[in-house]
Amino acid sequence: MESLFVFTSPPSTCSYLPDQQWSLTYQMVSQLTPLEYQERLKAGWRRFGFSLFRPTCPACTACRSLRVPVATFKPDRSQRRCMAANDGDVKLVIGLPEVTDEKLDLYDRFHSYQHEHVGWSDHGPKDASDFAESFVDNPFVTQEWCYYLGEKLVGVGYVDNFPEGLSAIYFFHDPAERNRSLGTFNVLSIIRAAAQWNLPHVYLGYFVEGCRSLEYKARFRPNEALGVDGEWEAFREG
């Protein structure tokens, strides 16, 4: 790993829990291998592009890194229905990340819907440069998971692959197909792929109790959370 600089943002209103203050520590890198990132991920870091980050909030520890042990995962009834409903209709194509007008439009429509109906901040349209910085320009090979309903692109996810697992980076989908629960389908597809590729864990990022946008992650059970002592521990058994 080749680090450029590290900085910590000053406390500000938390995007997950508005009654809390949050602060993030960032590390910008110019080089990073999958194995090096795996060790960072296991210690509670995440990344977008060449930027690593983790919460270092002064008075809150609500952000919990969550992972699913693939060998013991048991889908619940709702998740089984989701797989059955989408497996025959939705086609998954895994490739390398690239910027297209179709993906930019899908990203903007997803975020506009989340802003209007879920209360996300309105950041306006994402241009090609910003999109590439977040999802396309990476220190190592990242997978782009594109979901199609017929010829229509309905979902896009980004996934890191490393020796001990897969990491779900981000996912956005067509709000018009929200009844298909494509976010759930994406996570289930990642878990299924990890099982096929004999990888032990799927990392889902941060779970925050009380945050509607992140609480869904705990429904993939059994799962483990990173404790304050730096050890992974059973979290939601099912």
Image (cartoon, rainbow, N blue to C red):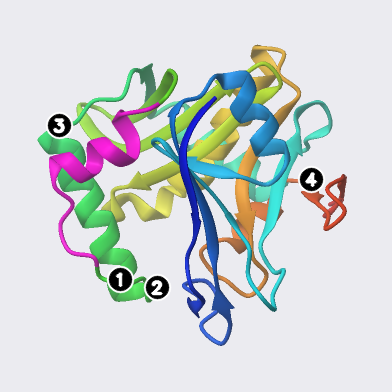
Q: Which mark is residue 115?
A: 1
Residue named by callout 4: 223
Please, what is the three-letter code of the amino acid marked with disc 3?
Thr
**In this rendering, would 48 be left or right of 191?**
left
User: Magenta segment range?
Assistant: 123-138
As shown in the figure, which amino acid type bears the numbered disc 1? Answer: His
Q: Residues within 10 Å of mark 2 (few under 14, many from 20)?
A: few
The spot of residue 237 in percent (x, y) is 87, 50
The vertical placement of 118 against 46, above or below, is below
- Give the spatial CA distance, label 3 vs label 4: 35 Å
In 3D space, how far apart are the residues under numbered discs 3 and 1 (Cα atoms)? 23 Å
Label at residue 52: none
- Residue carrying label 3: 100
Mark 2 sits on what residue?
118
Residue type beneath disc 2:
Val
Residue for point 87% across, 45% down: 231
